[in-house]
Image (cartoon, grey):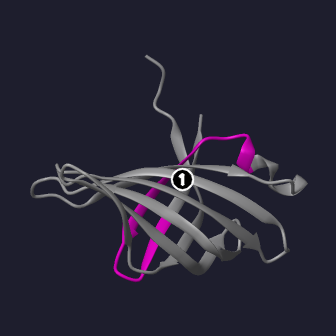
Amino acid sequence: MAPAPSLRYCFTVTAHVDPGIPLEKQGQDVLEFIPLTGGSVTGDITGEIVPGGGDWCLVRADGTFAVEARYLIRTTDGDVIDVYNVGVVREPEGGDVYFETTPRFRTVAPHLQWLTRSMFVGRARANEHDTTIEIFEITT
């Protein structure tokens, strides 16, 4: 068996959110759109969340949330990073909230191409006004 991969902390995204907007209901499942209104990025990358992105959150009947976010980061150098982030939120019995994500990045900035050449995972926490995700690169 191959050894488990390691994680390297890269940066933290704090996205400001507005209340969710219900879009669809099928049985007990409800799809909501959660607008992203701005925010900050700190760490190996610094910048801001460009207002206008969003999180499509499927609230499942079993209490699990399937999230799919799409937004842009504008770095302090003016570069733009497209973020597509898929995750799962659930509350295990007697434990901490499980909120893990798998972000993917696209950019034309030459010095940020490392974002397009690795896999990343995020550990997130959310409240009424923002969602914070610590992003880690999966290393060997």
Residue 134 % position (x, y): 50, 63
Residue placed farthest to the left in the image? Answer: 94
Query: Of residues 23 and 134, which is closer to you in this image?
Result: 23
Left-right relation of 65 to 35: left
Disc 1, SS = strand
For the image, the number of numbered tags is 1
Point 81% across, 49% down: residue: 113
Left-right relation of 72 to 70: right
The question of residue 121 being in magenta is answered with yes
Query: Of residues 114 and 55, which is closer to you in this image?
Result: 55
Which region shows up in magenta? 115-133
Residue 35 % position (x, y): 50, 73
Left-right relation of 78 to 47: right
Q: Quadrant of residue 107?
A: bottom right
The question of residue 137 being in magenta is answered with no
Q: Is residue 24 above or below residue 48?
A: above
Point 89% across, 53% down: residue: 110
User: Which amino acid, by three-letter code, is at mark 1?
Assistant: Asn
Q: Is residue 29 above or below residue 76?
A: above
Residue 114 % position (x, y): 76, 48
Residue 63 % position (x, y): 19, 54
